[in-house]
Image: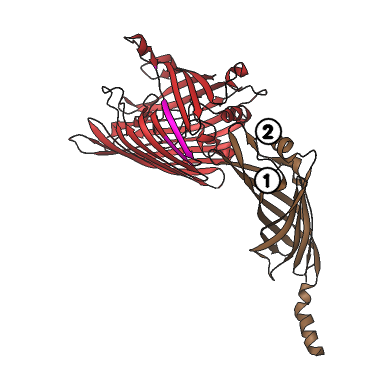
Chain colours: A red, B brown
């Protein structure tokens, strides 16, 4: 599964590696993660329903296979335009092979390139990496993946992800060291951009993220990123919190300050923040409120984009997820009043 | 000589009374760590009546037992609970855990300070000595007892819990909170 569920902290799951192959979460789940998805996420399930293809194919223990299809239908309503769009965001297969202290993982799926010139361009590997796990708490990873920064939110279009340039598809080649212990974790990532495609001027730099757990179901941390590319460099840093008040009530929040320095120009300060308060009505049905803000330059009024709203997220049975969201949003560069934005996300995982 | 004895009796008489602790609220919770990812498994008894106690405070000495119906334990995830009870604790064969306080000497004032204790735990059909800390806080006749101790599942013949890719550590931290009233005279 591509999505990460940091809110599972409310069940005591303070680190992603318990359920995901990736130390920073997201992507392929372990066999335990599959079992947990039916036990703690889904409204209904029968025994072993979350197994790969409902258990139709069994793999040896060293091999883990998954896949995701995600599509979204959007609707935007402004005083001047009403528009809708259907988009298959992702159709990927994912495979991991485990051999002793080493794990190799790769995805292969449909590229979102609109008019591929070569057949090979129709395909894309979003992530491929190798993990070396020499000690209980220590992980090293090399390959293409998303850096660890802030909360690994599944909603990648929010300001603290897409707004800061870390949308889905912005994975880079990195070297990562992760120390994941009881109540504490630290990720250090060296970022080398897109060494496979020199035409893509992806940032190179470093990212640090440290988290600390308070009590059994509360966690907070700090992140720092420094990146440079041909036209600019920037520092981004800020705190995040993951608060599991109860098993049916949690809050995820992140605030990041950004200092951007375009080459030859003065630097500017801005910020992004996101918050989501979520109530689980019954297991698998979530109602939530969310706010989202990005202001890339405090001195420039027009650099503000903002949204607030709510939604419902539904995990009816293992393999299926639906999310409907209604937001009031505005972009001051275009107009000052709020638009209505609705989107429905459908997710199926093998 | 007679006057010396009288002084000793007067000085110690406040420690000679006996009272029974009648529990109105009881909570047992436990925490265990599992790998990978330092997963915290949090459990507690789901039925408030699953804990039975018999605790007597006699002067400055406390003794008694507390038993727990293990079938009432819950970690919030049904499948995990099923494995815990059926496969590891084997509650069909060993339905209760019984904790026995050995005689414990209390301070003059019960203000909630930490007091070390020794006792025994009978779990999974195995009895082992255990030690830890206890706090007693008395306000008029109301008493709150909080005690915390660690056990190792292997000491009680419980196999290391393991499910899919996750393995639980052997150490389990147990916390018990008992609230109630003292019946009888402590002094």
Name the residue: 77% across, 82% down: B8
The vertical placement of A232 against B67, above or below, is above
Decide whether the magenta segment is chiefly helix, strand or loop: strand
Discs 2 and 1 lie in a common subunit: yes
The vertical placement of B104 against A96, above or below, is below
Quadrant containing the C terminus of chain A is top right
Q: Percent x, y for residue B88?
A: 71, 39
Task: Rate crowding at label 1 as few (under 14), some (14 to 19) or many (20 or more) other CA atoms within 10 Å.
Answer: few
The vertical placement of A81 against B13, above or below, is above
Residue placed most toward the observer, A185 or A105: A105
Pick whichever of labels 2 and 1 is earlier in the sequence.
2
Q: Percent x, y for residue A190?
A: 34, 36
Name the residue: 29% across, 34% down: A301
Residue placed most toward the observer, A270 or A176: A176
Question: Which stretch did the figure color magenta?
Answer: A124-140
Q: How many marks?
A: 2
Residue labelled with disc 2: B78
- Chain of the residue displaying label 1: B
- Secondary structure of the residue carrying tag 1 is helix
The answer to whether residue B91 is magenta is no
- Secondary structure of the residue carrying tag 2 is helix
Residue labelled with disc 1: B154
The answer to whether residue A136 is magenta is yes
Task: Rate crowding at label 2 as few (under 14), some (14 to 19) or many (20 or more) other CA atoms within 10 Å.
Answer: few
- Residue A171 falls in which quadrant of the image? top left
Name the residue: 22% across, 30% down: A231
């Amino acid at each position: 599964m591509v999505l990460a569920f940091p809110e599972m902290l409310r069940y005591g799951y303070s680190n992603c590696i318990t359920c995901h192959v990736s130390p920073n979460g997201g992507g392929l789940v372990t066999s335990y993660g599959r079992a947990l998805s039916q036990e703690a996420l889904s409204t209904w399930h029968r025994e072993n329903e979350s197994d790969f293809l409902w258990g139709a194919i069994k793999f040896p223990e060293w091999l883990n296979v998954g896949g995701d299809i995600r599509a979204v239908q959007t609707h935007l309503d402004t005083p001047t335009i009403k528009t809708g769009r259907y988009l298959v965001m992702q159709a990927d297969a994912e495979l991991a092979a485990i051999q002793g202290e080493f794990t190799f993982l790769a995805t292969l799926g449909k590229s979102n390139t609109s008019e591929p010139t070569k057949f090979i361009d129709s395909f894309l590997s979003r992530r491929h990496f190798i993990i070396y796990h020499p000690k209980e708490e220590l992980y090293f990873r090399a390959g293409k993946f998303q850096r660890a920064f802030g909360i690994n939110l599944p909603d990648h279009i929010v300001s603290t992800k897409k707004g800061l340039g870390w949308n889905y598809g912005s994975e880079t080649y990195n070297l990562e060291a992760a120390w994941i212990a009881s109540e504490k974790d630290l990720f250090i990532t060296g970022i080398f951009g897109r060494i496979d495609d020199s035409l893509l001027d992806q940032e190179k730099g470093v990212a640090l993220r440290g988290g600390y757990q308070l009590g059994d179901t509360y966690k907070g941390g700090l992140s720092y990123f420094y990146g440079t590319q041909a036209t600019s460099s920037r520092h981004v840093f800020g705190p995040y919190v993951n608060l599991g008040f109860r098993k049916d009530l949690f809050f995820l929040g992140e605030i990041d300050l950004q200092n951007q320095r375009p080459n030859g120009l003065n630097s500017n300060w801005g910020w992004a923040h996101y918050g989501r308060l979520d109530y689980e009505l019954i297991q698998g049905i979530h109602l939530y409120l969310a706010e989202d803000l990005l202001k890339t330059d405090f001195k420039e009024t027009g650099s503000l984009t903002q949204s607030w709203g709510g939604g419902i997220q539904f995990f009816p049975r293992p393999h299926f997820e639906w999310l409907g969201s209604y937001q009031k949003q505005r972009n001051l560069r275009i107009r000052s009043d709020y638009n209505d934005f609705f989107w429905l996300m459908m997710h199926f995982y093998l | 000589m007679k006057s010396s004895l009288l002084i000793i009796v007067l000085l110690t008489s406040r420690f000679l009374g006996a009272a029974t602790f009648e529990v109105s609220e009881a909570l047992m919770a436990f925490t265990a760590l599992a790998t990978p990812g330092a997963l915290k498994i949090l459990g507690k008894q789901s039925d408030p009546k699953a804990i039975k106690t018999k605790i007597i405070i006699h002067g400055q000495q406390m003794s008694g037992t507390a038993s727990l119906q293990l079938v009432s334990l819950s970690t919030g995830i049904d499948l995990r609970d099923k494995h815990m009870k059926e496969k590891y604790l084997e509650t069909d064969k060993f339905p209760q855990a019984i904790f026995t306080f050995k005689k414990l000497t209390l301070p003059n004032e019960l203000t909630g300070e930490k007091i070390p204790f020794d006792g025994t735990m009978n779990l999974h059909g195995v009895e082992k000595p255990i030690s830890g800390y206890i706090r007693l806080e008395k306000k008029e006749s109301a008493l709150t007892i909080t005690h915390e101790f660690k056990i190792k599942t292997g000491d009680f013949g419980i196999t290391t819990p393991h499910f899919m890719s996750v393995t639980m550590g052997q150490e389990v931290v147990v916390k018990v909170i008992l609230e109630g009233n003292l019946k009888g005279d402590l002094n």
